[in-house]
Image: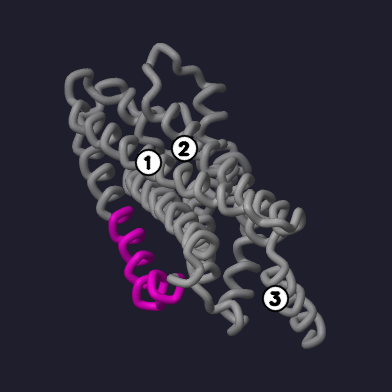
Amino acid sequence: ALLGNGLIISAVACGHHLHTPMFFFLLNLALTDLGSICTTVPKAMHNSLWDTSNISYTGCAAQVFLIIFFLGTGLSLLTIMCYDRYVSICKPLHYGTLLGSRACALMAAAAWASAFLNALMHMANTFSLPLCHGNALGQFFCEVPQILKLSCAKSYRRELGLIAVSAFLGFGCFVFIVFSYVQIFRAVLSIPSKQGRHKAFSTCLPHLAVVSLFLSTAAFAYLKPPSMSSPSLDLALSVLYSVVPPALNPLIYSLRNQELKAAVWRLMTGCFQRH
């Protein structure tokens, strides 16, 4: 995840020919992937290597805020990137108007700002709850459902309401993505070239698969009833929505894009030549 996303950020930032809406959003997505990985995995590795399981109260609050912030921004960016593909394939003549530099900047800013407010509300509400069942979390990072298990039974209804609202918004993003891809697939099927159809499907289907994996596992982790909870299931769900997508996204968006592969190769060969 670090290597793939780092290479994407470097290639897009240094390659002037990649300063297009698609690669601008991809750069933002790589930043959110780096952020979400760095929020959870380093602390878990530290605890594993030093045979400890402690985290400070402030550190736990920071993890809750950052993981919701980065994952929420990532979902918004994936939705925007789907809109970018829809416009470029289904309305190519309007691409410059609908996705100008100002519109792209506003959409990216809206994605970051809305995720910031959402994460702030979740963190403030979760950490205002009184804990009645100790302070031992059964997870490798501070996760809202695990904290709610420790809170008093009647005190977390507001947080459940916030989770329900977030789940509704996430479902709305998923419906928009699916609807956009239906339109894209209709347009792609009218392409006479088999190579053109294959290229479009090979890019769109993995994107849809990763979005589906992320949303389904995150929704199940946050919305499942406590009776279905078990340490192994909770761990598997958390890894699937917080660790796997940031590692897969660079592979999906770099290995299947010739321009980006060429830019990464030039970046790497240039570094080797200088050294």
State yes or no: discs 3 and 1 in contact (Cβ < 8 Å).
Answer: no
Q: CA distance from mark 3 to mark 1?
A: 33 Å
State yes or no: discs 2 and 3 in contact (Cβ < 8 Å).
Answer: no
Secondary structure state at the residue bearing disc 1: helix
Numbered mark located on residue 215 in the image: 2
Question: Does residue 143 sit above or below 157 in this rendering?
Answer: below
Q: Nearer the viewer, residue 179 or 217?
A: 179
Residue 49 spot, x, y in % from top left: 63, 43
> Mark 1 belongs to which amino acid?
Gly
Question: Does residue 65 sit above or below 31 in this rendering?
Answer: above
Q: Which tag, 2 or 3, sits closer to the chain's start?
A: 2
Q: Is residue 113 highlighted in magenta?
A: yes
Q: Which tag, 2 or 1, sits closer to the chain's start?
A: 1
State yes or no: discs 2 and 1 in contact (Cβ < 8 Å).
Answer: yes
Q: Is residue 183 highlighted in magenta?
A: no
Q: Which residue is mark 3?
A: 263
Residue 216 spot, x, y in % from top left: 48, 32
Seen at 41% across and 38% down, the residue is 142
Which residues are the magenta region?
A: 95-116
Q: Which residue is mark 1?
A: 170
Q: Which tag, 3 or 1, sits closer to the chain's start?
A: 1
> Mark 2 belongs to which amino acid?
Leu
Q: CA distance from mark 2 to mark 3?
A: 31 Å
Magenta: main secondary structure:
helix
Specify the quadrant that holds the C terminus: bottom right
> Mark 3 belongs to which amino acid?
Ala
**Residue extending furthest toward the top:** 227
